[in-house]
Image (cartoon, rainbow, N blue to C red):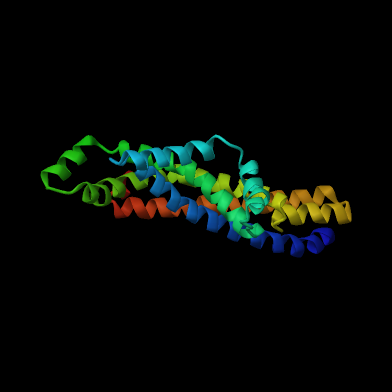
C-alpha cells in the first residue's frame, strides 16, 4: 500500500491529461460524426463523396499511423502541431469516421412513415431532418456512441507515443524509473477501468434523458 500511495500522485497527473484528451476528442468526434453522417445521405453528390472519402480513409488506416502523420509528417510540409493538438485531432478524426456510419444508419432506420408524415405537413428536407428524424435517431445512436467513447478512451493511450504525457506515458516512465512493473501497471489498469465505468454511466444517463425527451421513457 505504501508503494501505491507513492505512485498514485504521479499517475494522477497523467490521468488528468488522459481525461481531457478523451473528453475533447469525443466531443469533437461527435460533431464530426453528425456532419459526415448527414453529408453521407445528402442530396449533394459532392458532399456524399467528400464524406465517404473521409470515412473510408480514417476507418481504413491505423490510428497510430494517423497520429504519427499528424505529429511527425506535417512538420515536413511546414505545419507543426503540438502533441496536444495532434493527439486530439487524430482521435477526433478517427472516432468521427466510425461515428458517421452510426449516424447515417440510425437516420436511415427511422420508420419511413415519419418521412411521409413530414411531407404531408409540408416540411422542408431540413425541417424533416432536424425536427423529425434526428430526435428519434439520436436515441438509437447512444448505445453505440457509448461503446465508441470507451474505445476512444482506450485508444487515447496511443498519444503517449507522440510524447504526450498521459496516463500510459506516466506509467511507462515510472516503470522504467522504479522497476515496479506489477503495481504500476496494475494501478494503471484500475484507473482506465474506473474511467470506462464513468463514461458508461454518463452515456446511460444521457440515453435515458434523450429517451424521455423523445417521449420514449416507457420503452427504456
Q: Is residue 71 left or right of residue 96?
A: right
Residue nearest the viewer, comparing 65 with 4: 65
Q: Is residue 140 visible?
A: no
Q: 73 or 193: which is nearer to us? A: 73
Q: Is residue 138 left or right of residue 127?
A: right
Q: Quadrant of the N terminus?
A: bottom right
Task: Determine the residue positioned at 61% across, 54% down.
Answer: 86
Residue at x 57% of width, y 49% of height? 91
Which residue is painted at 69% across and 57% down in the image?
Answer: 164
Q: Nearer the viewer, residue 198 or 80?
A: 80
The x and y percentages for residue 210 are 35, 53
Q: Is residue 64 left or right of residue 207?
A: right
Instruction: Say above or below: 57 vs 203.
Output: above
Residue 195: image location, x then y, percent? 60, 54
Residue at the front extreme, as displayed: 77
Residue in the picture at 79% in, 63% down: 5
Marker count (numbered): 0
Is residue 54 shown above or below 204?
Answer: above
Tell me the quarter of the picture where residue 62 sits. top right
91 horizontally vs 14: left or right: left
Residue 100, visible in the rendered structure = yes
Rendered location of residue 74, percent (x, y): 63, 51
Q: Position of residue 169 (x, y in %)?
A: 74, 54
Amino acid at each position: 500500500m505504501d508503494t501505491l500511495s507513492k505512485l498514485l500522485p504521479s499517475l494522477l497527473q497523467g490521468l488528468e491529461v488522459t481525461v481531457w484528451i478523451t473528453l475533447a476528442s469525443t466531443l469533437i468526434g461527435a460533431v464530426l460524426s453528425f456532419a459526415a453522417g448527414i453529408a453521407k445521405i445528402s442530396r449533394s453528390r459532392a458532399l456524399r463523396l467528400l464524406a465517404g472519402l473521409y470515412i473510408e480513409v480514417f476507418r481504413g488506416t491505423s490510428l497510430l499511423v494517423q497520429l504519427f502523420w499528424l505529429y511527425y509528417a506535417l512538420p515536413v510540409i511546414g505545419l507543426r502541431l503540438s502533441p496536444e493538438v495532434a493527439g486530439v485531432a487524430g482521435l477526433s478524426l478517427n472516432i468521427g469516421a466510425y461515428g458517421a456510419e452510426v449516424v447515417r444508419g440510425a437516420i436511415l432506420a427511422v420508420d419511413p412513415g415519419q418521412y411521409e408524415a413530414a411531407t404531408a405537413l409540408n416540411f422542408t428536407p431540413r425541417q424533416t431532418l432536424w425536427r423529425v428524424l434526428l430526435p428519434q435517431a439520436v436515441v438509437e445512436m447512444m448505445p453505440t456512441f457509448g461503446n465508441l467513447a470507451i474505445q476512444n478512451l482506450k485508444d487515447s493511450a496511443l498519444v503517449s507515443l507522440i510524447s504526450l504525457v498521459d496516463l500510459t506515458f506516466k506509467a511507462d516512465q515510472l516503470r522504467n524509473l522504479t522497476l515496479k512493473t506489477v503495481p504500476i501497471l496494475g494501478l494503471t489498469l484500475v484507473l482506465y477501468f474506473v474511467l470506462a465505468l464513468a463514461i458508461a454511466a454518463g452515456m446511460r444517463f444521457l440515453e435515458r434523458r434523450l429517451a424521455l425527451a423523445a417521449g420514449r421513457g416507457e420503452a427504456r
